[in-house]
Image (cartoon, coloured by chain):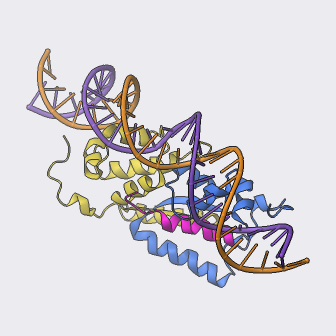
Chain colours: A yellow, B blue, C orange, D purple
Amino acid sequence: MKHSIQPLTDALKSAREKKGLSQRAFGRAIGVPQSRLSKIESGAVDLRTSNLVEIARTLDLEVMLVPRQFVPAVNSLVKQTAETNGGYEAQRPLYQLNEEDDDA
Amino acid sequence: MKHSIQPLTDALKSAREKKGLSQRAFGRAIGVPQSRLSKIESGAVDLRTSNLVEIARTLDLEVMLVPRQFVPAVNSLVKQTAETNGGYEAQRPLYQLNEEDDDA
DNA sequence: CCAATTGATAACTTATTGCATATCACAATA
DNA sequence: TATTGTGATATGCAATAAGTTATCAATTGG
């Protein structure tokens, strides 16, 4: 793995935790074993792009290709809103509407 | 591949073309065979995340996880600048500074 | 103290990537 | 017409992702 994908997987982990979901609960929601989520979040594996997209979407995140010159702008845009608005994860995601079983 | 990654690979293809590089020329620059680039750009393979990041960076693009609510904002930001500025790829990338051999 | 939850880790199997290499059809052009 | 550049495709092989299942240590709560 020439290029580390840690920043990306770290973001996935943060997003999951913000939703208050355990790896098992989240894994059940998206059909992925807990063992695998652990490996992904720790950066132990180089997951396929479609898998990244799938997991990200479940967490209300979208994988985008941003021209380098816009990266700082995008970062501050996202961060600012998060701070002044109690986090951009404030709104409940769809898949969580029917969550009686928060975990096993 | 549950989730298509075509929009992403299409973006890679567009970025490469904007730089006026053939698959062979670009492949040589990043150490990837032309046959593979073809498969990637056509969406025939589900490349690994680190590979996506690597290729994107060579094209001055960064893979980012953007909260869904910000996707439209980011899109318009990038698009607008591209239109009123002759494209955000106007600036020459680093790896192209020493390009005598534009292709094989 | 015991039970439940959480994340990390392991072993095994299967599916797919990714490289190397070669060929092909098509288009542009000398 | 012959040549050259382009992207699409094929085969074989090694590396690794991804699912299945199970266990473990460290919390945390009854």
Magenta stretch, residue numbers: B1-17
Q: Is residue A95 above or below residue A104?
A: below
Q: Residue at x 42, y 52 (%)?
A: A51
Taking depth in this image into account, of B64 and B3 the one nearest to the observer is B3
Q: Is residue C5 above or below residue A11?
A: above
Count the labels in the image: 0
Taking depth in this image into account, of B10 and B39 the one nearest to the observer is B39
For residue A36, side relative to residue B59 (left or right): left
Quarter of the rendering occupied by the C terminus of chain B = bottom right
Quarter of the rendering occupied by the N terminus of chain B = bottom left
Taking depth in this image into account, of B102 and C21 the one nearest to the observer is C21
For residue A83, side relative to residue B35 (left or right): left
| Quadrant of res C20 | top right
Q: Residue at x 43, y 63 (%)?
A: B4
Q: Is residue D23 above or below residue D1?
A: above
Is A65 part of what is drawn in magenta? no
Q: Position of residue A92 (x, y in %)?
A: 26, 62
Q: Residue at x 62, y 79 (%)?
A: B81
Instruction: Report if residue A23 is visible in the image.
Output: yes
Is B3 part of what is drawn in magenta? yes
Instruction: Report if residue B62 is visible in the image.
Output: no
For residue B90, side relative to residue A48 (left or right): right
Q: Position of residue D12 (x, y in %)?
A: 58, 40
Q: Position of residue D19 (x, y in %)?
A: 32, 42
Give the main secondary structure, helix, strand or loop, of the magenta stretch. helix
For residue A50, side relative to residue B42 (left or right): left
Q: Position of residue C2 (x, y in %)?
A: 12, 19
